[in-house]
Image: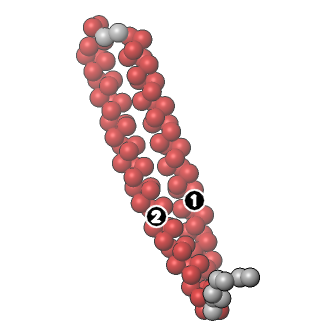
Amino acid sequence: MDTQPKQQKGEELTNPSKNTAEEYESLVQQEDEHIERLKTCTKLIWDALTIISQKASILHMETVKEAADHLHIMELDLRRELFKVRLKKSILANKMKRIQA
């Protein structure tokens, strides 16, 4: 037996809109977080390259290359995650427009 309270007809129309708006806001926050993380990662890469150009002769090159590869992989992962969030956000924006219409 269904024990859930039945929704009123008006609630059916407002709840999806409210949930969609909350989900959109969450995606905006996720996007901001990914952008900050990506900025930090990019700065670390540029700083690492600067250090390498200044001290390459005294650094173990295999370790340097491996560390740089890891930073680059992390940057690519962050870009992919940012793309996924932006894609979800775009789809949700379209859905919100249809709900409001």
Q: Quadrant of the C terminus?
A: bottom right
Direction left: furthest residue: 54
Q: How is the image coloured?
A: secondary structure
Residue 97 lies in what quarter of the image? bottom right
Numbered tag placed on residue 99 in the rendering: none
Between marks 2 and 1 in the image, the one whose residue lies nearer the viewer = 2
Query: Horizontal placement of 2 versus 75: left or right?
Result: right
Q: Position of residue 91 (x, y in %)?
A: 60, 64
Q: Residue at x 45, y 36 (%)?
A: 75
**Considering only vertical position in the picture, is 15 above or below 30?**
below
Q: Residue at x 32, y 25 (%)?
A: 48
- Which is more N-terminal, label 1 or label 2? 2
Contact (CB < 8 A) between labels 2 and 1?
no
**Considering only vertical position in the picture, is 27 above or below 39?**
below
Q: Residue at x 56, y 62 (%)?
A: 90
Q: Residue at x 52, y 78 (%)?
A: 18
Residue type indicated by callout 2: Ser
Direction front: furthest residue: 1
Query: Horizontal placement of 66 versus 94: left or right?
Result: left
- In the picture of the structure, the residue carrying the numbered disc 1 is 88
Question: What is the crowding at mark 1: few (fewer than 14 residues within 10 Å), some, or many (at least 20)?
Answer: some
Residue type indicated by callout 1: Lys
- In the picture of the structure, the residue carrying the numbered disc 2 is 26
Q: Quadrant of the N terminus?
A: bottom right
**Considering only vertical position in the picture, is 30 above or below 99?**
above
Provide the secondary structure element on which disc 2 rests: helix
**Considering only vertical position in the picture, is 51 above or below 41?**
above
Q: Position of residue 42 (x, y in %)?
A: 37, 36
Q: Position of residue 13 (x, y in %)?
A: 61, 86
